[in-house]
Image (cartoon, rainbow, N blue to C red):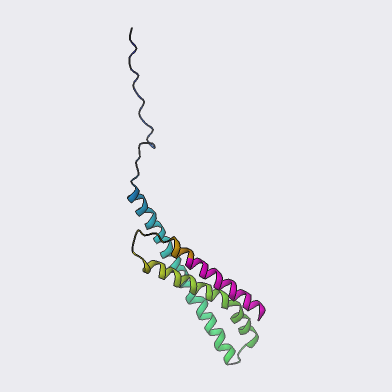
Amino acid sequence: MIPEKAHPSPPHPLLSIQFSLPYFRSFLYNRVMKNIESIKKVSLIFFIIVGAIHIISTALIINNISLKTAEIINNTLFVPFLVSSLIYGSSSLRLSLFPEHENHKFLDTTLSAIIVIITITSVTLSIIY
């Protein structure tokens, strides 16, 4: 008696999904761009709010109104104002600088390094002075 060939079991549904590389890259690129757009929107809100408070406190210092409180607010909000402006500017630059589907690792690393260096420098200088 000759054994019959066993019927192969159907593949698992998750194993039968095939990803095409261009589709996957496009999907990741769109997610990254949406994240950067969200970061840009949030940093713009922080930039406007912190900047307005910073400008008001500077005006209070110039006019000698509530001098001690205005100086505390002004010295405290300098670094957050700087960081929010750097993040907004770098996210805007990142969104508008290069066309789609290019490697942006060098640009992202450079912009992040610039933000970190300027933030550490400003925090250090605000502590020293």
- In the rendered image, the vertical position of residue 80 relative to residue 108, given as above or below: below
- The reply to whether residue 46 is in sight is no
Q: Is residue 59 visible?
A: yes
In the displayed structure, 54 sits above or below 46; it is below
Number of numbered callouts drawn: 0
Q: Is residue 29 above or below residue 88?
A: above
Judge whether residue 120 is colored magenta.
yes
- Residue extending furthest front? 106
Residue at 52 percent across and 70 percent down: it is 115
Name the one closer to the observer, 103 or 42. 103
Where is residue 21? Give x, y as percent.
Answer: 35, 48
Residue drawn 39% across the image and 33% down it: 12
- Residue numbers of the magenta segment: 110-129
Q: Is residue 33 left or right of residue 128?
A: left
Q: Is residue 43 above or below residue 53?
A: above
The picture places residue 97, in percent across and down from the top left corner, at 37, 68
Rendering quarter of residue 17: top left
* Depth order, front residue of 47/11: 11
- Percent across and percent down for residue 96 are 37, 69
Asked whether residue 41 is drawn in magenta, I would say no
Q: Residue furthest top?
A: 1
**Quarter occupied by residue 119:** bottom right
> In percent of the image, x 63 and y 78: which residue is there?
126
Q: Residue 13 placed where, x, y %?
A: 37, 35
Which residue is located at x 55 percent, y 73 percent? 118
Q: From the image, which quarter does the N terminus lie in?
A: top left
Which quarter of the figure is the C terminus placed in? bottom right
Q: Most prominent secondary structure in the magenta stretch?
A: helix
